[in-house]
Amino acid sequence: MMTEFSGQVALVTGGVRGMGRAIADALLERGARVAVGYSRSWTAAEAFAAEHGARGVSVHQGRIGDADDCERVVNEVIDRHGRLDILVNGAGLTVGPEVVPGSEAWTRAVDTNIAGAFAMANAALPHMLNQRHGRIIGISPAGPYDPQLSDAASAVQFRLTVDLAERVAGHGVTVNCITPGEPWPLLPPGGENGDPPDPARIARAAEVTRLAMLLASPHAGEINGQVYSLDGGLNLCVRRSQSMTFTKRSTA
C-alpha cells in the first residue's frame, strides 16, 4: 500500500459513489484515513462502510446546501479522527438543458454546487489554518454544455476558488478546483465502440483522481487558486466555433 497520505485525514463529500468514490478509494490506497459525506445515498454509504470498515473509514450524512449541516459534518470528522487535512468537495448536482435558470431544480443545484462547496470550505478552513496545513479541492459537476450557463458557472467557480485561495495564501493551505467537462454519455459517438469524440470528452474518473491526488499531496504546496479544466479541449472547440460564427455574421 502507498503511504503518501499516511497520518492525514480526508473528507470527501459525495464520496460513496461516482467520481467522489473513486477519489475516496485512491486516498485510502495511499494511506489516508477517509471520511465520506452523503445526502440520500444510504445504500451506497452502507456498502462503502462495509467494504472499508476495517480501515477506519467513517460515513457522515448531511445536506450540503445547509451551512449548519456542513459545520456539523466537519466537526463530526474531527471528533472521530482528530484532525482534517484534505477536503474534497465532490458532492454536486447536474442539470439538463431543459432546466430554466431560477427554477427550483436550478436553485437546488446552485445551493449544492456553489453555496454548499463554499459552506464546506468555510467549515474546514479554521481547523486547517490552525494546524497550518490543508488542501481543499473542488470538483465542479459536469453538465450538458450550454455556453451561457457554463460560462456563468465557471466564472462563479473561478471566483470562489480564487477568493478562498487568497484568504489562505501563506498559511500552509491551498484551494484548487477541477472541472471534468461534459458528461461522456451526452456526447455524440465518435468511434465504432461509442467512444466520445476526441478532444471534446469528459475526463474519466481515473484522470480526475490522478490530478486530485497531486493537488492533495505534500508536493503541491505552491499550487493555489487554480481551476483545471479536464475537458479535452471542449471549451476551446466551442469558443472557436462561436468566434467563427460571429465572424461570418459580421462579414455577411
Image: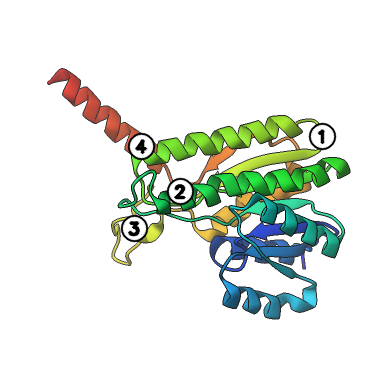
Q: Position of residue 173 (x, y in %)?
A: 77, 40
Q: Residue at x 69, y 76 (%)?
A: 49
SS at mark 4 in the image? helix
The front one of 105 and 152 is 105
Quadrant the C terminus occupies: top left
Measure how far apart labels 3 and 1 are at the Cα level. 41 Å
Disc 2 to disc 1, how far (Cα)?
A: 34 Å
Which mark is first along the chain, 1 or 4?
Answer: 4
Query: Is the C-beta separation of discs 2 and 3 under 8 Å?
Result: no
Camera-nearest label, 2 or 3: 2
Asked if the residue at tag 1 contacts the one at tag 2, i.e. Cβ–Cβ closer than 8 Å, the answer is no
- Measure the C-alpha gap from mark 2 to mark 3: 23 Å
Q: Secondary structure at mark 3?
A: helix
Quadrant hosting residue 164: top right
Q: Locate residue 179 relative to residue 237 in the image: left or right.
A: right
Residue type, label 4: Gln
User: Where 65 falls versus 27 (above or below)?
Assistant: above
Separation of marks 3 and 4 at Cα, in angstroms: 18 Å
Q: Give the mark nearest the N terminus, 2 or 3.
A: 2
Determine which residue is flagged by label 4: 148
Q: In terms of depth relative to the viewer, which is nearer, 157 or 196?
A: 157
Which one is closest to the eye, mark 4 or mark 1? 4
Q: Mark number for residue 186? A: 3
Q: Which mark is residue 171?
A: 1
Q: Earlier in the sequence, mark 2 or mark 4?
A: 2
Residue 48 percent location from the top left of the image? 65, 75
* Residue at screen point 55% across, 55% down: 207
Q: In front of the other: label 3 or label 4?
A: 4
- First along the sequence among labels 3 and 1: 1
Q: Quadrant of residue 76?
A: bottom right
Circle 2 is placed at which residue position?
107
Question: In terms of secondary structure, where does tag 1 sit?
Answer: loop
